[in-house]
Image (cartoon, rainbow, N blue to C red):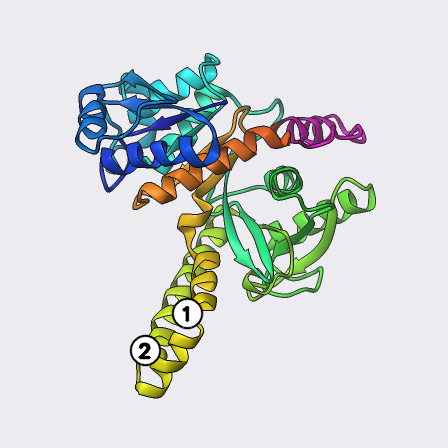
């Protein structure tokens, strides 16, 4: 299996992406195509004395920056690493892609180059979050600020297929984020979406559990949390901020005196396990769902280990059969017919 890596979108430079690729080859057993400034990539490989087994290089001299307008960049920067990498994926030179570049440009370019599933209105950004005793996804978390009820229903089907295939959850619980659990709560968008998701649940297409409030996201109230991009992004950023606050306060508590420091030392291993579970670097990135190939959006500040995790996630995404299951579910939804029995996920 070959994962295509856009090497030029990282805040930490080419050293982070190349280092992540080397780690991924070793730990995930994949081949990695490094796309970007070939001279800079080879310089890192030589300087760090990295092994080159499992690595190939595809030169791309231009870069889409965070300041670039997504649509303009996609149309005018054809030699940018992100565009070259996506085209390589579309041409069958790899099985999935990882990029830490401009999110809007990645979504736009993936839609134009890889194409959406037939009948699918928009692709969606999907955050994988610690939730309850496991992990859940939040879809959409910022790609589509304005949504229709039809789009949210499609997001629910895409998210359910992803969680079933990639995360191994049988019959994922789908919840609609709202300001209350009653079916009449929310704006007209939420009220209408509730009814459509309820009908999908009654038809056996989804395991819809109803409206869920924001506190259920960290509480494990669902496996798939559905929202428009505006609401989802607010939930995501609040979630991240609350996590940072808790981590700071907890560290201050543990370091406050000799007694608490000794207590911290006695549970050092457990603290390490908790930190690992909460660390985005272990997850790697956010999948973009709705396009015909696996796309993982890595965090801009990802270090080498985070990129290796993102590559591992891309591998699992490809192997899971989730792309096929999404296309089957969305095809049945758009045709108004019951979905056929899904293929067994690998």
- Does residue 250 lie above or below 343 as drawn? below
Residue 227 seen in render: no
- 51 left or right of 90? left
Q: Residue 244: percent from the left, percent from the top?
A: 37, 65
Does dot 1 land on a helix, a strand or a loop?
Answer: helix
Q: Residue 113: percent from the left, percent from the top?
A: 44, 19
Instruction: Name the residue that disc number 2 marks.
Output: 252
Span colored in magenta: 324-346
Q: Residue 110: percent from the left, percent from the top?
A: 44, 26
Instruction: Name the residue that disc number 1 marks.
Output: 268
Q: Residue at x 34, y 32 (%)?
A: 22
The Cα atoms of the two marked residues, 1 and 2, are separated by: 15 Å
Mark positioned earlier in the residue sequence (1 or 2)? 2
The quadrant holding residue 336 is top right
Q: Residue 168: percent from the left, percent from the top?
A: 66, 43
Magenta-colored stretch includes residue 207: no
């Amino acid at each position: 299996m070959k994962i295509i890596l856009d090497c030029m979108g990282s805040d930490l430079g080419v050293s982070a992406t190349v280092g992540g690729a080397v780690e991924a080859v070793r730990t995930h057993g994949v081949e990695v195509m490094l796309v970007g400034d070939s001279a800079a990539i080879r310089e890192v490989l030589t300087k760090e004395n990295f092994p080159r087994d499992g690595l190939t290089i595809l030169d791309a001299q231009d870069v889409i920056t965070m300041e670039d307008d997504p649509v303009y960049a996609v149309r005018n920067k054809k030699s940018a690493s992100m565009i070259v990498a996506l085209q390589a994926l579309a041409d069958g030179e790899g099985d999935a892609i990882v990029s830490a570049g401009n999110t809007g440009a990645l979504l736009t370019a993936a839609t134009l180059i890889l194409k959406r599933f037939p009948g699918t209105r928009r692709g969606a950004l999907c955050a994988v979050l610690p939730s309850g005793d496991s992990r859940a996804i939040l879809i959409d978390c910022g790609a589509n600020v304005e949504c229709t009820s039809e789009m949210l229903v499609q997001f629910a089907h895409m998210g359910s297929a992803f969680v079933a295939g990639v995360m191994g959850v049988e019959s994922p619980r789908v919840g609609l984020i709202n300001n209350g659990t009653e079916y009449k709560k929310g704006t007209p968008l939420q009220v209408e979406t509730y009814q459509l998701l309820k009908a999908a649940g009654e038809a056996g297409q989804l395991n819809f559990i109803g409206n869920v409030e924001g506190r259920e996201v960290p509480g494990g109230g669902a496996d798939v949390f559905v929202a428009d991009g505006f609401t989802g992004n607010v939930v995501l950023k609040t979630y991240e901020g609350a996590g940072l606050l808790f981590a700071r306060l907890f560290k201050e508590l543990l370091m406050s005196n000799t007694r608490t420091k000794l207590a911290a030392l006695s549970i050092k291993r457990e603290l390490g396990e908790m930190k690992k579970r909460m660390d985005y670097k272990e997850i790697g990135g956010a999948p973009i769902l709705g396009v015909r190939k696996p796309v993982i959006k890595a965090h801009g500040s990802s270090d080498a280990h985070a990129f290796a995790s993102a590559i591992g996630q891309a591998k699992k995404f490809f192997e899971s059969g989730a792309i096929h299951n999404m296309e089957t579910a969305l095809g049945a939804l758009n045709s108004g017919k019951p979905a056929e029995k899904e293929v067994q996920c690998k």
